[in-house]
Image (cartoon, rainbow, N blue to C red):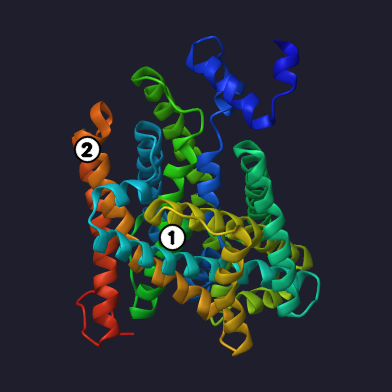
Amino acid sequence: MTDSIARQTLSERTDTQIREVLAGRRRGFRSALLFAGPAVIASIAYMDPGNFATNIQAGSGYGYSLLWVVLVANLIAMLFQALSAKLGIVTGRNLAELCRDEFSAPVRYTMWVVSEIAAMATDLAEFLGGAIGLSLLFQMPLIAGMTVTAVVTYGVLLMEKRGFRPMELIIGGLVAIISLCYIAEMFIAPVAWGQAALGTILPSIPDSTALTIAVGIIGATVMPHAVYLHSGLTQHRAPGRNDNERRKLVFFSNWECVIALAVAGAVNMAMVIMASAAFHAGHSDVAEIESAYHTLTPLLGGAAASIFLISLMASGISSSAVGTMAGQMIMQGFVGFRIPVWIRRLVTMLPAFVVVLIGVNTTEALVYSQVVLSFALPIPMIALVMFTRNRAIMGNFANGRLTDIAAIGGTIVILGLNAILLLRTFGIPIPGFGNG
């Protein structure tokens, strides 16, 4: 038996140990860690370079006043990632597969096209962010940074062939790097903690530019591809063989979602706080990642600037790899086939190269890519709410009344913000949202 276990891969050993926990033969904190992984991978989508771009603009331009948007977005994210994980655990199918099975052909193909557009917008932000971090940290041309990012990301993706556990550990390590970087930044930046607390609990949208950034924050935080992906990460990972095992899996999954996304939310809030502390008082015009780096050096020192770039680089590489995984799973779910990962990697990189070659401002491209994601987001959110409240699909695991109310409320918040942004885009004034 011992020799048999020794010959197992890391993923197989993890699966065996999870079975022991589900059977009640194994307990303790280390046993709980066996269930950590899917939410950690999904959480990287909430710390991608699109977040850097929108959070820098929020902090430098509006100080601490948009911190409440980050908090609301993260609470919505916790709920929907938990629902997505539950869907995969209970049904053994991912969200895209259920959309294919439950909706008509025109609806599912429309959903697939919108999801692919969202995936490309996602990769634009993630790939550019990693490349910007590399090019600034190592003083290389941006195109060279993009090339290196492409190679490293592809190398990370190859680890997926070894099973679920190596990828979970790699992404978990990169999440740890990003988190430690922002813990360090909080000790360096002169934070006004009282103002930060007020900005977290008092809603405020000073003007239409702040509204655009707020919608970008939502789009950069609650990610369409992450909502799809989480169900795919849990559907085959030590699947429950009966309702009792599925109930335990959902329990551990919910806790993982809370912890992993609380970390992601804290990192996002730290980004806004750092940008506010460093730039708002005398450098509120800082709106680009590159200028943030160059301004940080004289303000807070070279260490702060380098830490910022290391976190950006780790964010870009890890989130780009996860975005490609999500794109593969979405295509497989909706239309039933996959393409080689190097082809998907090549196709999703093209917009980033086009943006750079034609001279588009990279940070503006990042922010507007997040707005695109916010408009794509209600589609998987609505589908997820429909499926997880359906007893024919979920059985005893269908959403309770309070969960339903919260999920529907979160979807309405997203739809409402998007509707307001559309009205402002066409010049229609909205009382209470400023005219700036």
Q: Amino acid at mark 2?
A: Leu
Tell whether 133 sits left or right of 191.
Answer: right
The local crowd at label 2, few if under 14, some if 14 to 19, many if 20 or more residues have their Cα within 10 Å, is few
Measuring from the top left, give residue 411's x and y in whole percent: 26, 55
Q: Nearer the viewer, residue 343 or 384?
A: 343
Q: Residue at x 68, y 54 (%)?
A: 181
Looking at the rendered image, the disc whose residue lies closer to the viewer, 1 or 2, is 2
Q: CA distance from mark 1 to mark 2?
A: 26 Å
Dot 1 lies on which element?
Answer: helix
Q: Residue at x 31, y 53 (%)?
A: 381
The mark nearer the N terminus, 1 or 2, is 1
Dot 2 lies on which element?
Answer: helix
Q: Residue at x 39, y 56 (%)?
A: 335
* Image quadrant in which you'd find residue 162: top right
Up/down of 43 relative to 343, above or below? above
* Image quadrant in which you'd find residue 414: bottom left
Q: Which residue is mark 2?
A: 402
The extreme front residue here reads: 337
Q: Residue at x 39, y 58 (%)?
A: 68
Up/down of 198 relative to 302, above or below? above
Q: Nearer the viewer, residue 33 or 194?
A: 33
Q: Which mark is residue 211?
A: none
Measuring from the top left, give residue 26's x and y in whole percent: 56, 13
Tell whether 100 sits left or right of 309.
Answer: left
Q: Which residue is mark 1?
A: 67
Does the rendering let one see residue 198?
A: no
The extreme bottom residue here reads: 358
The quadrant of the rendering that contains the C terminus is bottom left
Q: Amino acid at mark 1?
A: Leu
